[in-house]
Image (cartoon, rainbow, N blue to C red):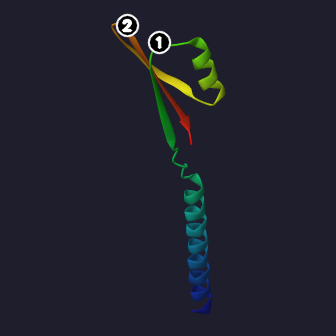
Amino acid sequence: MLRRMRNRILLAAALVASLLCVVGFARQARPERALWEYNVSCGRVQVTDANRLGADGWEMTAATQDGVVTCLYYKRRR
């Protein structure tokens, strides 16, 4: 009788320990949400402006053109 109770207690302790490990790993595996800021540059585009933005950490994500007006869209992490 005591042996059966001891085995049940050990099994319950093992289950609790494994559950705590799974919860701990799940918290660590959650990726951090990225925060972004955006910049739009429309009009006459200069290469030096694009180089300056790139040096400041901006990444060009899109470009549109409506007739003669060109717009460049940039983003970077906050």
Picture quarter with the C terminus: top right
Q: Is residue 2 above or below residue 20?
A: below
**Which residue is the site of mark 2?**
68
Q: Earlier in the sequence, mark 1 or mark 2?
A: 1
Q: Is residue 25 above or below residue 10?
A: above
The residue lying at 50 percent from left, 40 percent from top is 36
Check residue 44 in the rendering and tell me which mark sits there, or answer none. Answer: 1
Report the residue that reaches farthest toward the top.
Answer: 68
Q: Nearer the viewer, residue 31 or 41?
A: 41
Residue 63 percent coordinates (x, y): 43, 17
Q: Is residue 57 above or below residue 51?
A: below
Q: Nearer the viewer, residue 58 or 15?
A: 58
Residue 19 percent coordinates (x, y): 55, 68
The residue lying at 62 percent from left, 15 percent from top is 48
The amino acid sitting under disc 2 is Val
Check residue 1 in the rendering and tell me which mark sits there, or answer none. Answer: none
The residue lying at 62 percent from left, 86 percent from top is 6
Q: Are marks 1 and 2 in contact (CB under 8 Å)?
A: no
Q: Nearer the viewer, residue 63 or 5?
A: 63
Report the residue that reaches farthest toward the right.
Answer: 55
Picture quarter with the N terminus: bottom right
How many numbered markers are drawn?
Answer: 2
Q: Secondary structure at mark 1?
A: loop
Q: Nearer the viewer, residue 17 or 63?
A: 63
Give neighbour class at mark 1: few <14, some 14-19, many 20+ (Cα, 10 Å).
few
Give neighbour class at mark 2: few <14, some 14-19, many 20+ (Cα, 10 Å).
few
